[in-house]
Image (tube, rainbow, N blue to C red):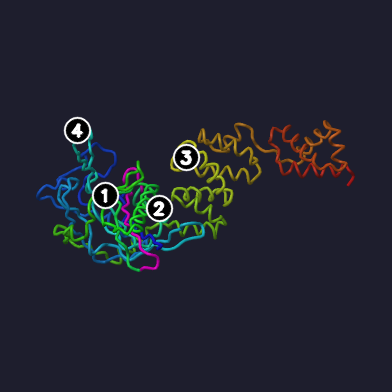
Amino acid sequence: MEYETVIGLEVHVQLSTKSKIFCASSTEFGADPNEHVDALTLGMPGSLPVLNKTVVDYAIMLGLAMNCEIRNFNRFARKHYFYPDLPKGYQISQFEEPICERGYINVSFSPDSQRPIGIKRIHMEEDAGKNIHDMRTEASLIDLNRAGVPLLEIVSEPDIRSPAEAACYLRAVRQICRYLRISDGNMEEGSLRCDANISLRPVGEMKFGTRTEIKNINSFRFVEKALEYETARQLSLLKAGKQIRQETLLFDSASGSTRPMRGKEESSDYRYFPDPDLPPVVVEERWIREIRSQMPKLPEQISKELVEIYGLTPYDAGVLTSERDNVDFYLAVYDVCQNAKAACNWVTSELFGALNQQGLDISTSPVNAANLGALIKLIDSEIISGKMAKSVFEEMFKTSASPQEIVEKQGLKQITSEDEILSIIRQVFDANPSQLKSLLEGNDRLHGFFVGQVMKSTGGSANPKKVNELISREAQRLAGK
């Protein structure tokens, strides 16, 4: 019997707000343990939550970006569980009435394969604290800085059919969040985390199999590896005639395997009920229109424009739109030089290569967009050659100087005067009479020899195109043609 893998992801996106979702404590990462806590974070009696409006703005924005219906009337609920990372004994989340429902995003699984993945719901909630297990003292320590940090949980439909597709979907979610600037999506710092639900069923079967949930996966590679392992594990059990147990699992990245964490909870285990301390959130159409008007263009739309308007290849468009900062930089370069293909080549090849070598990203580039655009203009106007431009770029990357300053300081201006180049060609001809005789007798291979000699005598500053043209013209004149 052949089996089909069915995967759904629950992605937790930590929002880039300055304060927590229900109190004024800071969300800054990297503080000393328990520095960003207050009475509400500690669950002190009498402390009351106050909703951070920016969290709702970001939820609406993400819902619109993911083609969701925005629920006009939504409310918060208490999700009860007794772990020390939430001192209140419950998490404030949303249950039956989330802010966003029934959406989708288009995900590219290969250059020729794209299809929509359904979004079941997006809801607002608070994050939990962090448990730190100290093996030296055999004690567990609690850091509550993260407790109360705002999260959006994005629950996909079970539309994903392979571990590789799951990783592609997760990258697409992160890309959208970073474009909207609602989260930095830094998985190493826990800004983006993923729970994966997976089951297997016979091909053609409509009923879902028994699912397991893999908790808190924090990298694209680990998502793929964890799901690959769990697919193989479940498949071996089914082929052996054994039952899949519904449970929550952890992924051990060292061994590349999953291991049981606890039995899988159902919603009834959490005893959800509406939070009596928070009024319902009423989202009017005017609010939605205001958020929509503030939204940037999304990767899919920008990629389409780069191909249809700027004439780039789908591959180049995909490279540029991988990050919003990259495409913003490219468009700024294009605004200066008005050469779409050259701007793409210099950004994706020369600049990205230099940045990767130094471990930098586009936001910390020593070469700004205006200077890179100016460098391309110098090439297009034949003031410098492409070869010269590479050495100028290297100096720009070292010093952050403008290309005009470097060209002027180093005397790199290209020789474009026909009279000047022709004078040099005649000198080279006179210095190489035997090679000239052979050229005039029809040995075209010596054309390259003379090009090289002229470029050598000018220190590479002569315009190569004009050198080629003028050598041919002068040779024809001497041959009497």
Q: Mark number for residue 167?
A: 2
- Marks 1 & 2, CB-CB < 8 Å contact: no
Nearer to us of marks 3 and 1 is 1
- The residue positioned 11% from the left and 47% from the top of the image is 44
Distance from Cα at disc 2 to Cα at disc 3: 29 Å
**Residue 137 tag number:** 4
Comes first in the chain, label 4 or label 2: 4
Mark 2, Cα crowd under 10 Å, few <14 / some 14-19 / many 20+, is many
Describe the element under mark 1 as helix, strand or loop: strand
Instruction: From the image, state whether disc 2 or disc 3 is nearer to you.
Output: 2
Q: Is residue 402 visible to us here?
A: yes
Q: Which mark is residue 260?
A: 1
Residue 110 horizontal/vertical position (percent): 49, 56
The stretch in magenta equals: 185-205
The answer to whether the residue labelled 3 contacts the one labelled 1, judged by CB atoms less than 8 Å apart, is no
Disc marking residue 365: 3
- Work out how far the residue at label 4 is from the one at label 2, CA to CA, in angstroms: 37 Å
